[in-house]
Amino acid sequence: MARRRKRQQAHENHERWMVSYADFITLLFAFFVVMYALSSINEGKYRILSDSLSSAFRNTGGGRIMVITDGAPPLPVPVARPDKGVRDADEKALQRRRMRNMAKEIMEALAPLAQEGKVRVLESSRGVMVEINDSVLFAPGQARLSPVSEEALAAVAGVIAQTVFPVTIEGHTDDVPINTPQFPSNWELSAVRATTVLRLFARNGVGAERLTAIGYGEQRPVETNATPEGRARNRRVTIQIDSAIPEAPTEVGEQMSDAKEVEGSTGGEQVPGN
């Protein structure tokens, strides 16, 4: 029995730790090989990476760029998106530049009439407003455009058609009453004049969904109607080009129901009635 125990002790392996050690060294070597492969980028691909980074940071929108490495698939690198306030400010600045350029083009198209004092082009926070005296457009008490005014308005429509902004055409008169079979009052006269300009714009490429015609009659004068000069100024057609595209409407009932749900979910202490 003693001899058997001595033989078993003699064959016992005390170097089993070397197997684990060898596995560890192999994994460590493989790790350094992978790290070296990822870090070796040639000059051409480094330039591609540099150009991608420069282009990404010049753009306003967020996205991804691709890092190309030797012996490995492209690695996506996220590019941080600008703050919403910054994006809104950039969008507003772009809108202002577009509106200013459009106002200059309209002014050039109406330059002869502007020199006569018959046309004014105004810029505001709302957008661009073109004010045209009705003596250029219509005969007294009529709503048919003259050939000269059709040509001028067609040029304006060509400028507006290249944009996406909503357009409101307003008809205005003085306070002198009118009562004809076609126009029982200044309301009808101003509305038909505005609609006549609207139809001309639609025929010359401006989307009908962007157009609105309103007749104000004598209700919104810009000068006094006590003088011939003031009445002449009040007889006008105004083309309002809005810089802001209207948002989709939300039903009030839905908002109220949502508010009640939020209020009900918060709970609260109930106070008994008197």
Image (cartoon, rainbow, N blue to C red):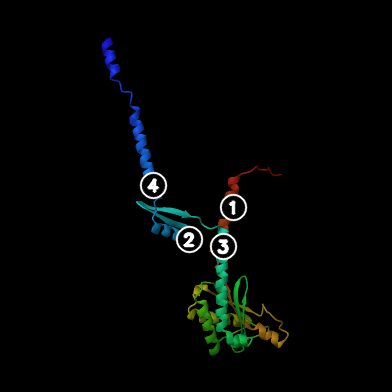
Which of marks 2 and 4 precedes in the sequence?
4
**Comparing marks 3 and 2, which lies closer to the viewer?**
2
SS of the residue at dot 1?
helix
Residue 231 image-quadrant placement: bottom right
* Residue bearing mark 4: 36
Which of marks 1 and 4 precedes in the sequence?
4
**Comparing marks 1 and 3, which lies closer to the viewer?**
3
- The type of residue carrying mark 2 is Ser
* Residue bearing mark 1: 259
SS of the residue at dot 2?
helix
* Residue bearing mark 3: 88
Task: Please report the residue visible at 46 percent of the width from the left and 54 percent of the height from the top.
Answer: 78
Which of marks 2 and 1 precedes in the sequence?
2
Which of marks 2 and 3 precedes in the sequence?
2
* Residue bearing mark 2: 54
> Can residue 145 be spotted in the picture?
no
Task: Please report the residue visible at 56 percent of the width from the left and 69 percent of the height from the top.
Answer: 95
Estimate the spatial distance between the alpha carbons at disc 1 and disc 2, rounded to whole Å. 46 Å
x and y, in percent, of residue 195 in the image: 55, 80
Above or below, 258 relative to 108: above
Task: Please report the residue visible at 44 percent of the width from the left and 61 percent of the height from the top.
Answer: 51
Above or below, 52 relative to 99: above
Residue 115 image-quadrant placement: bottom right
Estimate the spatial distance between the alpha carbons at disc 1 and disc 3, rounded to whole Å. 28 Å
Label 4 Cα neighbours within 10 Å, binned few <14 / some 14-19 / many ≥20: few
Task: Please report the residue visible at 70 percent of the width from the left and 81 percent of the height from the top.
Answer: 223
x and y, in percent, of residue 73 in the image: 36, 52
